[in-house]
Image: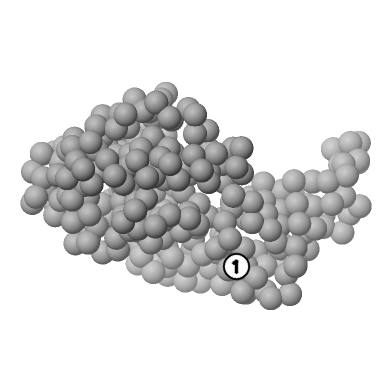
């Protein structure tokens, strides 16, 4: 009804999930905004989920979602991705696609420019929407497999999980000593200013983690998995530390917590990178 009355020249499809409402053979031009390569998220959940039923469902689901995703890309007039990696993944699967363009993520660098991280603080931070399955998995993974290893070197280490609508399994993490689950906070800068390291131990997901760009803009040193850092043009050991596996990840966190010079160097380079490549003006 709206299309009939408004007669749009173009329709912007925000996320693949909205493509079901579009008539691709209509007169209007369609722009599919791919915040992620969606089927990759489900494929990775199939590899990493702790629940066998979830793994079984994801293994059945991701090839179907891949086929639907490629169909939507073929039928759209224009497809936007948030990183060159995502664009390459879609074009690798469908070499005939000539309508896919990468448009980088932009962040409000100025909003975060005055944050002073607490280098040397034993407090570790994660932020994210806490009902999103990849985020739920990664904070559980950190508390279970990584945090105990960090505490072998930094016994006073604490972990803050910040983000809206935490599911029950995330809320239960707060029963563990030194773990805080805040839910939504009005201003993430206040929490970040009390922390020494930002962690992104993601094992599934796609797109670009804006949380990492925000942390970089604040000068907060980041430890991320390879999956978490995808799509960000940063060098491990210079702008952040990329570590896969509990032992390597824990060592990287402990190094940044105990070496103030290292934390300042990584955080300062990260802040400069965010300003140079990921401001709204640059995007």
Image position, residue 15 (x, y; %): 63, 50
Left or right? Give the position of 130 relative to 153: right
Q: Residue at x 91, y 52 (%)?
A: 27
Q: Quadrant of the N terminus?
A: top right
Image position, residue 10 (x, y; %): 83, 46
Label 1: how many Cα within 10 Å (few below 14, some 14–19, many 20+): some
Left or right? Give the position of 67 relative to 199: right
Q: Residue at x 23, y 36 (%)?
A: 119
Considering depth in this image, is 243 or 272 the residue closer to the camera? 272
Q: Secondary structure at mark 1?
A: helix
The residue indicated by pointer 1 is: 88
Left or right? Give the position of 75 relative to 189: right
Colour convention:
one colour
Q: Quadrant of the C terminus?
A: top right
Which quadrant holds residue 177? top left
Which quadrant holds residue 250? bottom left
Q: Residue at x 79, y 52 (%)?
A: 30
Q: Residue at x 15, y 41 (%)?
A: 157
> In the rendered image of this protein, does residue 97 appear above or below residue 78?
below
> In the rendered image of this protein, does residue 246 appear above or below residue 31?
below
């Amino acid at each position: 009804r709206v299309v009939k009355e408004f007669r749009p020249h173009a329709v912007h499809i925000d996320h693949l999930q909205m493509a079901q409402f579009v008539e691709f053979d209509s007169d209007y031009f369609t722009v599919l905004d791919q915040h992620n390569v969606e089927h990759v998220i489900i494929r990775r959940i199939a590899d990493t989920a702790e629940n066998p039923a979830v793994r079984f469902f994801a293994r059945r689901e991701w090839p179907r979602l891949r086929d639907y995703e490629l169909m939507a890309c073929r039928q759209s007039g224009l497809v936007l991705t948030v990183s060159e990696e995502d664009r390459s993944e879609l074009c690798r699967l469908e070499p005939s696609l000539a309508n896919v363009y990468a448009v980088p993520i932009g962040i409000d660098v100025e909003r975060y420019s005055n944050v002073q991280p607490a280098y040397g603080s034993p407090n570790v931070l994660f932020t994210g929407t806490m009902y999103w399955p990849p985020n739920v998995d990664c904070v559980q993974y950190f508390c279970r497999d990584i945090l105990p290893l960090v505490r072998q070197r930094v016994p006073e280490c604490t972990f803050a999980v910040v983000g809206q609508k935490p599911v029950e399994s995330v809320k239960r993490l707060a029963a563990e000593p030194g773990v805080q689950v805040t839910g939504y906070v009005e201003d993430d800068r206040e929490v970040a200013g009390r922390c020494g390291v930002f962690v992104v131990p993601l094992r599934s997901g796609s797109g670009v983690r804006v949380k990492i760009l925000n942390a970089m803009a604040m000068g907060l040193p980041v430890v991320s998995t390879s999956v978490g850092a995808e799509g960000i043009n940063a060098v491990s050991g210079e702008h952040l530390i990329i570590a896969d596996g509990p032992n390597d990840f824990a060592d990287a966190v402990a190094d940044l917590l105990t070496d103030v010079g290292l934390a300042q160097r990584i955080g300062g380079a990260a802040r400069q990178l965010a300003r140079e490549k990921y401001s709204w003006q640059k995007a």
